[in-house]
Image (spheres, rainbow, N blue to C red):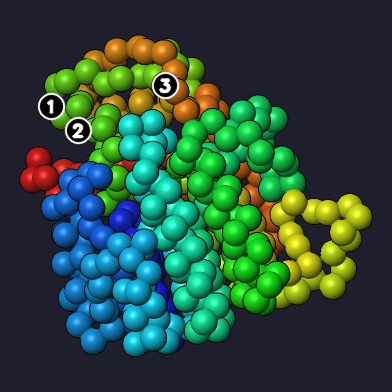
Amino acid sequence: MTIIVTGAAGFIGFHLCRTLLNNGDTVIGIDCVNNYYDVSLKKARLEILSSFQDLFVFKKVYLEDKQSIENIFQEFKPKKVVNLAAQAGVRYSLENPDAYINSNLVGFLNILESCRKHKVEHLVYASSSSVYGGNINMPFSEMQNVDHPVSLYAATKKANELIAHSYSHLYGIPSTGLRFFTVYGPWGRPDMALFLFTKAIFESKPIKVFNEGNMIRDFTYIDDIIESVIRVINKPPGDNLNFNKSNPNAASSWAPHKIFNIGNSNPVKLMNFIKAIEDAIGIKAIKNFEPIQPGDVPATHADTKLLENWIDFKPKTSINEGIRNFVEWYKSFYNI
C-alpha cells in the first residue's frame, strides 16, 4: 500500500520507512530536514531510503505549509499515514517555543485536514511519555490524568491527542496516538543521552549527569518500537459501542481513536545506563553531576498492558544489548 510517513529523515521515521520499504510498501517520506541537529546524519538516513528507488518518494516540506501537504495527499492518495514529524526535545522548547507551535500544532492540524479530505484509513501519530508531566504515580497508565505538563513540548503532544480525538469523532478518521518512552538505538538522535554520552566518552570529555544521577528512564529499543508501530498501523481502531460516557475511559473512546503507551516497561537507573555504555565502549566516563533541568521529570515507567493486548507484542531488547548495538553503529558510522 501507499503510506505517508512524516519525519522520514528522523530517527524513528527512518527506521519505520526502511522497514515498510523492505516489506514492499510504497512510502512517501516528508521531512523539512531542519538543523535542530546534525543535518548530515539526516541526509545519510535519506540516502539509504532513496536506494529503494521505485518505492520511496521524498518531499522536503514543512508540515505548516498547508498547501504543499495537501498537494502531496492529492498526488499520492495514501491509505495510511504515520505522523512522526515534530519539533522534538524538552529543553529546546524553553529556547524556541514558536518552533513547537508551528510544527506540532499547526503542522499536525494540516495533516489531520488532509486525512479528512482524502478519507485516510488510519492515522498513527507520535505522542510522548512527556504528557504524564508532574505525575509521580508509577507505572504511567493511559488511564491516568495527563493535564499537568511540565514543558511546552509535552503540552503540544497532549494537544495532539485531543485534536486527533475530535477529528475521529467528527469525521470518523481512525487514529491511534503512541506515547513513546525514550527511544534509543542505531541512527539515534545526537541530542539524546546515549549519543551525547557515547560521543563524550570517545572524546575523553566529561558527561553531564542531571539530577545528580537520580534519574530513571524507560528506555525502549528502536527495533521493538518499529515492530510495535507496524502492528499498530495494520490494526486501526473502530467505534466502541460499549463505551460508557458516564464513566469515561481515558485510553479509549466511542470514536475510532485509541491512545497507547509504547515502552519497554522495564525502567533503568541513569547510573546503570551509563555503566552499560562504559562497558560497551570499554572506557570509564568522566562525570559532572548537575541539578535536574527545567522541563525534565525524574522518572518514567510505562504500563504497556493495553498495547500488548492490542497487538500481541511486548518489547524484549535488554538495555545492554541495545547499547552494544548503538555503540557498534556509532563506531562504524564515525570510523572509530
Q: At label 2, which amino acid type do we have?
A: Lys
Quarter containing the N terminus:
bottom left
Q: Which residue matches tag 2?
A: 199
Against 112, residue 103 (above or below) is above
Q: At label 3, which amino acid type do we have?
A: Gln
Residue at position x 18%, y 76% from top? 51
- Residue 284 figure quarter: top left
Residue at position x 31%, y 74% from top? 68
Q: Is residue 3 visible?
A: yes
Q: CA–CA distance between discs 2 and 1?
A: 6 Å
Disc 2 and disc 1 in contact, CB within 8 angstroms: yes
Q: Which residue matches tag 3?
A: 293
Q: CA–CA distance between discs 2 and 3?
A: 21 Å
Q: Which mark is residue 203?
A: 1
Crowd tier of the residue under label 1, counting other residues whose Cα lies within 10 Å: few below 14, some 14–19, many 20 or above: few
The numbered mark, 2 or 3, whose residue comes first in the sequence reads: 2
Q: Secondary structure at mark 1?
A: loop
Against 231, residue 161 (above or below) is above
Crowd tier of the residue under label 3, counting other residues whose Cα lies within 10 Å: few below 14, some 14–19, many 20 or above: few
Q: Secondary structure at mark 2?
A: helix
Q: Position of residue 232 (x, y in %)?
A: 56, 68
